Amino acid sequence: EAGVVQSPRYKIIEKKQPVAFWCNPISGHNTLYWYLQNLGQGPELLIRYENEEAVDDSQLPKDRFSAERLKGVDSTLKIQPAELGDSAVYLCASSSTRGPSSYNEQFFGPGTRLTVL
Amino acid sequence: GDSVTQMEGPVTLSEEAFLTINCTYTATGYPSLFWYVQYPGEGLQLLLKATKADDKGSNKGFEATYRKETTSFHLEKGSVQVSDSAVYFCALSSLYGQNFVFGPGTRLSVLP
């Protein structure tokens, strides 16, 4: 079974430029998460999707960040324009909330390391 | 809100030493508790979990017991190996797995 796929793995851009990250979750997983991980810190949730609906985007800086999950499968996270402080690793994770267990494991992708110059 | 506190690293041990990484949490209700591990250049992987009080999660020689009375979920391993060098994250999940909160991570380095 393929894991969570993210691309690109690395991205270097200049400030004020746009950037987009792509995530393909594990097949059949209805829940998708985007996290921000700063150096030396734990992941922080940006947005959570249940199928195609964004059910928790309270931590997403909506002035410059946007996300979509068309058809409830792949997802794209965009930053426009990027700022120096956006340099971090952006993690995607997926899980399935179907089945007998109410507390389901999240499977993480390798992340996209963004450097804003 | 919910939060997770971990002991600060880095932790440096010799091979075959005993490992403890402390984790305490604050949460409403009865969360599930997790330990994730992140090896260099890789994504986070679930190491073990416990879903209710007094449960013990175990995997690859690592263990952690859900202690509701002390709101703790300390990670232990009796004999670490060089291959255990990684960053370890304690996390909790409430609201039926829909609200994950991670600790800041503890970097472990095991020397041969």
Image (spheres, coloured by chain):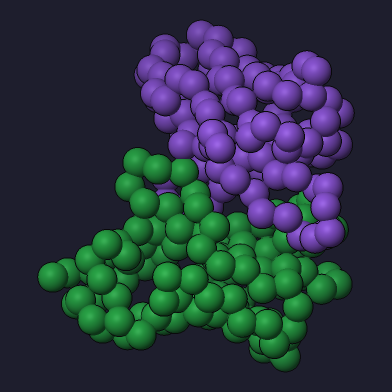
Tell me if A91 is positioned left or right of A33 in this view: left
Q: Residue furthest top?
A: A17
Query: Could you say which is closer to the camera, residue B85 or residue A61?
Result: B85
Q: Colour of chain B?
A: green
Q: Position of residue B94 (x, y in %)?
A: 79, 61
Q: Residue at x 26, y 83 (%)?
A: B17
Q: Residue at x 51, y 8 (%)?
A: A17
Q: Is residue B88 above or below residue B71?
A: above
Q: Is residue A90 above or below residue B52?
A: above
User: Which corner quadrant holds the N terminus of chain B?
Assistant: bottom right
Q: Residue at x 61, y 25 (%)?
A: A24
Q: Residue at x 59, y 76 (%)?
A: B57
Q: Which chain is purple?
A: A
Query: Could you say which is closer to the camera, residue A114 or residue B99?
Result: B99
Location of residue B42 by image quarter:
top left
Location of residue B112 by image quarter:
bottom left
